[in-house]
Amino acid sequence: MDVTREIIPWVWQGERLAIGLDRVGHGPVLLALPAPSSISTRGELMPLARRLGTRFTLLCVDWPGFGTHAKPALAWTPEAQAAFLRHLLDAVAPQPFATLAAGHGAATLLTVAAERDAGRLCLLAPTWRGPLPTMLGSRAALFERIAALAEHPILGPLLYRANVNRPMIRMMVGGHVFEDRAGLTPEWLAAKAEVVNARGARHASLRFVTGALDAFADRAEFLAAASRLRAPILCLYGDRTPRRSKAEMAALGALPGVRTLVLPRGKLGLHEEYPDLVADAIRRFLDEGSDQTA
């Protein structure tokens, strides 16, 4: 299946960014957003996009501050992520048939979908807290100081490299993202190296890890944002999801009007590791709002 690679120009705080977009397939438009993380890239959506692309046009888009393109030295905020998604829904993919958002991207989607038509919402292992607040169960003033170090010309790079070197990536992905470490192939690691080595990557990465990109202060705000929406919502996650993240997904899935499906396999990266299972679940959900046949 052919992939058309495009660049989205976007300006934030006076800086002009080039953000990657991959266009795959034919049919109604699905806007697809990866999970913002230290190794985030639209490429993680490609296995899923190829499976859904037989019936839909997938627009797989990097988040600002992430991906393989060079990035400016900005103190990234939840407001920047939300502003970019508004831009996508206004100028790039207005009124899509559905929007897919993985991981932390789901929180941004829930905030923006209250004011923009994002179609049906497919939330893939949705989270709202960064790794450190999730691990410790709360926010801490120390996290804000760590996030601020991302802007330091010397300490910032040192801290970043301590967080995203190859052994740390293996440990992080093997523990929380992939269920089967066999997926951590040399080719996969090389692709992720492009992400972590991109100029300016540390600024968004460290802020994500410390919770500085969290759109909500607590679970109550997360659930309230979902409760306000009228669009159909699918909450999809794997049974092997880490315990604390899984509790947040279960709370979201328990809301009235949210369709929940727990797959027998998968952790936080289930869309990348088990694209066949995820694609089947998304098709069934989307068929409820379409006259298309499989």
Image (cartoon, rainbow, N blue to C red):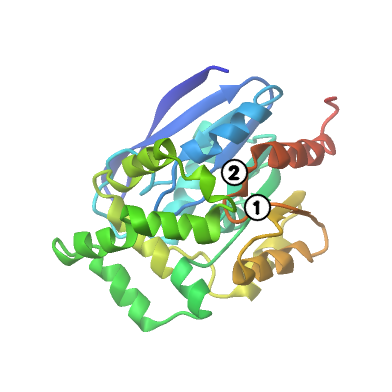
Residue ranking furthest to the top: 2
> Residue 110 location in percent, x, y?
62, 56
Kind of residue at badge 1: Gly
Q: Mark 1 points at which residue?
A: 266
Instruction: Identify whether 204 is placed above or below 31.
Output: below
Q: Which of marks 1 and 2 is nearer the N terminus?
A: 1
Mark 1 to mark 2: distance in Å?
Answer: 7 Å
Quadrant of res 189: top left
Please give the label number shown on residue 273: 2
Instruction: Identify whether 44 is placed above or below 171.
Output: above
**Would residue 31 appear left or right of 146 to someone viewing this image?**
right
Mark 2, Cα crowd under 10 Å, few <14 / some 14-19 / many 20+, is: many
Please give the label number shown on residue 31: none
Which quadrant holds the N terminus?
Answer: top right
Which quadrant holds the C terminus?
Answer: top right
Mark 1 touches mark 2? (CB < 8 Å)? yes
> Residue 119 location in percent, x, y?
69, 41
Asked if residue 92 shows in the view, the reply is: yes
